[in-house]
Amino acid sequence: MSIQDILRTMDYGTAPEDASIVTAWLEKHQNGLGHFIDGAFTDPGETFEVANPATGEVIAHVTQGSEADVDAAVAAARRAQPKWAALSGHERARYLYAIARHVQQHTRFLAVLETIDNGKPIRESRDIDVPLVARHFYHHAGWAELAEDEFAGTEPYGVCGQVIPWNFPLLMLAWKIAPALAAGNTVVLKPAEYTPLTALAFAEICVEVGLPAGVVNIVTGDGATGAAIVAHKGVDKVAFTGSTEVGRRIREQTAGTGKGLTLELGGKSPFVVMQDADLDAAVEGVVDAIWFNQGQVCCAGARVLVAEAVEDRLVAKLTARMKTLRVGDPLDKNTDMGAIVHPVQLARIRRLMEEGAAEGVTITQGEAPEGCFYPPTLVTDVAPASVLSTEEIFGPVVTVTPFRTPDDAVELANNTAYGLAASIWSENVNTCLDLAGQIKAGVVWINCTNVFDAGAGFGGYRESGFGREGGREGMMAYRRHHARRGEVVEPAEPHAIPGENAGAGIDRTAKLYIGGRQARPDSGYVYQVPGGLAGLGNRKDIRNAVEAAAKAGSWGAQTGHNRAQVLYYLGENLSARAAEFTERLAAFGASKADAKAEVDCAIRRCFWHAAQADKFDGAVHATKSAHVTLAMHEPLGIIGIVCPDVAPLAGLISLVLPAIAMGNRVVVVPSQSKPLAATDFYQVLETSDMPGGVVNIVTGPRDALAKTLAEHDGVDGMWYVGGAGAMVEKASAGNLKQTWVEPDRARDWIGADGQGRGFLHRATQVKNIWVPYGA
Ligand code: NAI
């Protein structure tokens, strides 16, 4: 055999990793493993089997967590939390540093255990998972040290309930536990039932470093145990990574509980190859995008979108490269792809592939041994609507779809309900950055893929969930602004009066404001309010308003400077009519002085937000040495805003202004009992060069309109002030809108807490764009 033959076939021997330290550990625990609660391991209870997916061999028996176990863990976390939060940031940092060091010392053990439990190649667990775990604890030791300076005005949530999946068992644990602890919380974490072992090994590290009892609690079990953690009254914040289906259920389950919530869910991420891309580099990119971790990666580049002109060349190169991938023993250091985590997942991949095959797609595959393995797979001749292009397969299967123009590429990329990640390949940086701005995803990799670092935020747009893990934005997911408890003011249901001119002698009838025009309510009904009559809006009006907002998308693409001009103009025009607005508020029963203070506040809010429009900018994260990572603040899109009944003008301005300053469009339901300040406000909008559709106002029954907004798939976020926050959160689960709900008197709208960076954070989501730099 010639050297060329050897290189072509890559037929070289095996290089098995020595697993003896893990075998010894498993033997030590052969009678079963309990939970880790209050600093100690419990005796094993009712157990379930954990198997090595590569061999099918049962390697451990792990305890199925009961409600009583969850109770005990939450109680321990609750007891420990005040003491943990009372430590100085420096003291907390010392523990996190110690954890990082111990993880490094145990790297080989943890990597082998992870590989045996999960089936991923040792090359990945050793070189990617475990080093990133250590990096995460180091980085967050830093945040612990700085927490008091960097997050002034915020406090830890308290006890965090964390549920993680099986694809990166130890890494997901680190992503959850490190920021929670750095921020002063204590945790109850449940690893996935397929892969609980490294979490228990991590608990041993907590003992080794002398972490105070109760700060970290690990409860093992299945979805029922996870559900018990999520539902537990003693949990203040829930953080979940897993399927969108379960994430949606958790959104519904936590609605109205006041618990903080972050969700990191599924994806179907595009991998865009432009005509001028370096195709060989892009092929290696696809290997890392979809054949890394057997494709069981939430941000896997599962949809290759390729410029038509280079499709054939790319497919030929990909096919050749795919056939060189070695699938097999995960403990072999030469293995490229290991085992699928569990036969249930293998069956799921096969089922989806059968469904796809029935559609007539072309399937090309590499090789895989018998057992819980699946070969690397390339699917061509596949329609964008195919089950293989739309469903998250969570296996080593990539589809290839051609496009003609960059606009087509963007359209195809965004043709999904998800928005976790995207990868863009072109030798032209202008093209890359242009597409990066248009693709709806929380993470964008330019000429690279699946790059992670503790210093950058990770998380999705749309149905991929909300909240970020990593970096400053990830820390903010574990701190909240000091809570204020407000009372709820419930206005009486508006009494419908037919016809717009009913109630002779009442001074005026205000219309709705949709798409930059005054509009009659669809119902034809009005209702009586102080100072006149207001339109009784209904579902149809909300739908029209959302449609109008959807057409005003260019607002978000304008520069901050341009938006600022409009907001300054708005402030000036409001100022010119200050006396009229003061009179209106006084007519609602406010004292002259209070009315004037509210109008003055509204004017100042316009100027403050105009100032912020081009200043609330993002960051450049210091991530890996060969990249800069741009953390861009992007608008959510369309936000439904349901205003407080108190402070009818200042409440509305305080909510609408941050939303539009950051480039969102809004559908606003003003104070139900005193809406005429808002309808006066649209006359100011009309004279201020505000493009039609950016602000839409629908008056009427607050909670009924809120429900329609929350259920509407075209609405990306919901801000609701009032008594029906639970309903709003639950109804928002459909497309996993970001929500912000508060009782009516939760804040003093006219005072300082009616404005601030917190509002701007809520109006934006961070897109992290990884750009090669200095390499
Ligand atoms: P899953 O979402 O059911 O499991 C993830 C975690 O949630 C596990 O710890 C599980 O025990 C827990 N869990 C399940 N039901 C729960 C509930 N009602 N309340 C609280 N916790 C609950 O995901 P599964 O069934 O393992 O995988 C199914 C599909 O989900 C995969 O094929 C893949 O498409 C997707 N998935 C996505 C992940 C991601 O990182 N985005 C990770 C794992 C799965």
Image (spheres, rainbow, N blue to C red):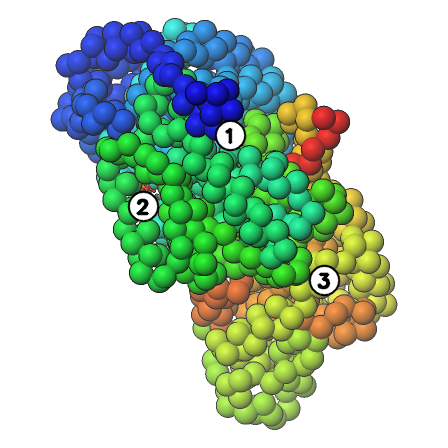
Q: Residue at x 28, y 32 (%)?
A: 369
The mark lying in front, picked from 2 and 1, is 2
Crowd band around label 2 with a 10 angstrom C-alpha radius: few (<14), some (14–19), many (20+): some
Q: Could you give the CA–CA distance between mark 2 and mark 1, rounded to whole angstroms?
A: 40 Å
Q: Residue at x 26, y 14 (%)?
A: 41
Picture disc at residue 555: 3
Q: Residue furthest front?
A: 1
Question: What amino acid type is highlighted by mark number 1?
Answer: Pro
Question: Disc 2 or 3, which lies upstream in sequence?
Answer: 2
Question: What amino acid type is highlighted by mark number 2?
Answer: Ile
Looking at the rendering, the quadrant in which ligand 1 lies is: top left
* Residue 768 location (% of width, % of height): 63, 40
Q: Which residue is mark 1?
A: 156
Left/right placement of residue 50 relative to residue 232 reads left
Q: Residue at x 48, y 28 (%)?
A: 8
Q: Which residue is mark 2?
A: 349
Q: Is residue 417 visible?
A: no
Crowd band around label 1 with a 10 angstrom C-alpha radius: few (<14), some (14–19), many (20+): many
